């Protein structure tokens, strides 16, 4: 149980274009979704926290207008990287918190974004 | 200072060796502690939670010292399949439940 499906697994896009990443909770309602970014040889860095039906809370240094997060339903959260640049190339992972114990976090399989 | 700091890696050990990872955290309000394992180009997977009394799961033993804000993971009789990056993770009760990850320590177990 508590599976998050993340798509796409990888994407290559041109500079200046936008890319949307989706995370769907398949068998539970994800009231909170966390979005992380991971550069090579570095740890997961939290970008933002989204709660269903409200605006996302962004971590310091993360541009709200560049990384658009939408959490319009209890089963879907999306991250859109707008006007992507090569420095946005990274591994993006979502994580949902679910009811079911103190340690109820489940991760999507990640999206590897390459901007050329 | 990073919120969660880990031993620098990589650790290269032979099969059967015992290896220990250390981690410190800076936020005294942290409530929950975990070790995650991450394989190359994959999402992190929960290895084990860490309790104040210490806990063991097979070859893996985790310890927590709240006074020192220190967490450890011991792997005994290491296997080739243990090769991965081990992430120390902390959840703070006053930050909306978000998980804070350490930079990870890479382990390579050789035959």
Image (tube, rainbow, N blue to C red):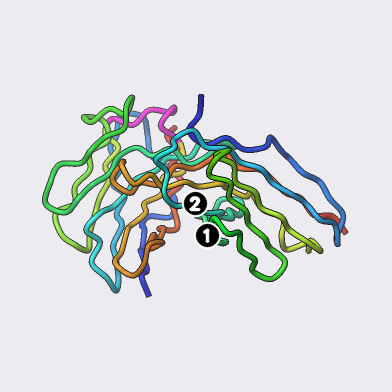
Tell me the number on the disc at residue B33: 2
Image point (44%, 35%), residue name: B27
- Residue A52: % across, % down: 16, 54
Image point (71%, 60%), residue name: B82
Query: Furthest residue to the left?
Result: A53
- Residue A75: % across, % down: 22, 63
- Residue A29: % across, % down: 23, 66
Q: Are marks 2 and 1 in contact (CB under 8 Å)?
A: yes
Q: Secondary structure at mark 1?
A: strand
| Dot 2 and dot 1 within a common chain | yes
- Between discs 2 and 1, the one toward the N terminus: 2
Label 1, residues with CA under 10 Å away: few <14, some 14-19, many ≥20:
some
Mark 1 chain = B
Q: Quadrant of the N terminus of chain A?
A: bottom left
Q: Quadrant of residue A103?
A: bottom left
Tell me the number on the disc at residue B49: 1
């Amino acid at each position: 149980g508590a599976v998050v499906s993340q798509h796409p697994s990888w994407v290559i896009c041109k500079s200046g274009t936008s890319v949307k990443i989706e995370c769907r909770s398949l068998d539970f309602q994800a009231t909170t979704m966390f979005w992380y970014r991971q550069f090579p040889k570095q740890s997961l860095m939290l970008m933002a926290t989204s709660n269903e039906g409200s605006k996302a809370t962004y971590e310091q240094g993360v541009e709200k207008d560049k990384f658009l997060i939408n959490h319009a339903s209890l089963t879907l959260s999306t991250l859109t990287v707008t006007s992507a640049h090569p420095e946005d190339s990274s591994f993006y992972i979502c994580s949902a918190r679910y009811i079911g114990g103190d340690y109820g976090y489940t991760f999507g399989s990640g999206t590897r974004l390459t901007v050329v | 200072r990073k919120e969660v700091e880990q031993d620098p890696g990589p650790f290269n050990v032979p099969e059967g060796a015992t290896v220990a990872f250390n981690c410190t955290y800076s936020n005294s309000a942290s409530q929950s502690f975990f070790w995650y394992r991450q394989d190359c180009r994959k999402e992190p997977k929960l290895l084990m939670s860490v309790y104040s009394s210490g806990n063991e799961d097979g070859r893996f033993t985790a310890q927590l010292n709240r006074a020192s804000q220190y967490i450890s993971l011991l792997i005994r009789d290491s296997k080739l399949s243990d090769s991965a990056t081990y992430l120390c993770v902390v959840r703070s009760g006053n930050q909306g439940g978000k998980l804070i990850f350490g930079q990870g320590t890479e382990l390579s177990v050789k035959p």
